[in-house]
Image (cartoon, rainbow, N blue to C red):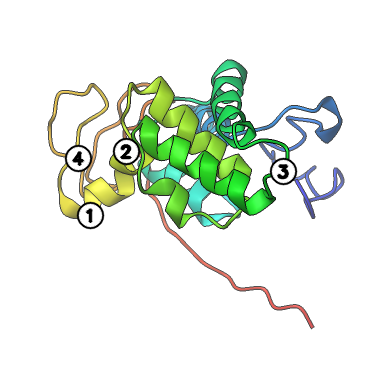
Amino acid sequence: GAAKATREERRGVPHHLLDVRSPLDGKDFSAGEFFDAARAATADVLDRGKVAVVAGGTGMYLRWFLHGKPATPQSTPEGSARARAALEAAADALGAGACEEQRWEAAVAALERAGDGVSGRKLARNDWYRLTRAMEIVQESGGIPKGQFSAPHKLAATGRGDNAEGTGAPAPTSLLGSSWAGSVASSAPLGEALDCDVHCFAVGVR
């Protein structure tokens, strides 16, 4: 991570999930992978009777850590390649004379034909990464668009949604009032054993 604590600064307190992936190996470290690794590290800390301090970061990552990740199909190299190929085929069908704007519109139209008529129109033009991910989701889910996979923290706010086992039970409405699902990779919240305080700090740069 950028601006991370130095090795000397980390000597007094064990740090987790630093230096777990080198930027030189050419592999992504997805939010889903972070979720699994962070939950595993937290479970280990709690099992040893220690207090876990979560420091960071991007809001989406923290929401996933606290409430669970959406039930969207996990991205894979193969799935991403299929989605990218479908979008490129739609854009290439316009011919060599098509401009980038036309290619983008053709790719968005392909996503709409696949079953997601919303995600592409919400994206900034030429955000091919997110467009590809939206196509991968709709392809791998059998036609279910990205927008229908609600994040657990949104389900909890409305008091609806499925539990970790998919039984259709109402989603927990609070972090501390829920139960530990027993699996660090589940979408259930961390559980009542976790005494959680959230502190936000805004750091200004002069």
The residue shown at (67%, 45%) is 98
Q: Gap between marks 3 and 4, in whole Å?
A: 51 Å
Check whether the beta carbons of the residues at disc 4 and disc 2 lie within 8 A of each other.
no
Tell me which label, 1 or 4, sits earlier in the chain: 1
Quick one: label 2, few (<14), some, or many (20+) residues within 10 Å?
few
Tell me which label, 2 or 3, sits earlier in the chain: 3
Residue 87 screen position, x and y as percent: 56, 32
Which residue bears the numbered disc 3? 97
Which residue bears the numbered disc 1? 157
> Which numbered mark, 1 or 3, is in the foreground of this view?
3
Which residue bears the numbered disc 4? 171
Amino acid bearing label 2: Phe
Residue 48 visible? The answer is no
The residue shown at (39%, 39%) is 112
Q: Secondary structure at mark 1?
A: helix
Q: Nearer the viewer, residue 11 or 33?
A: 33
Tell me which label, 1 or 3, sits earlier in the chain: 3
Quick one: label 4, few (<14), some, or many (20+) residues within 10 Å?
many
Amino acid bearing label 4: Ala
The quarter of the picture where the N terminus appears is top right
Tell me which label, 4 or 2, sits earlier in the chain: 2
Which residue bears the numbered disc 2? 149
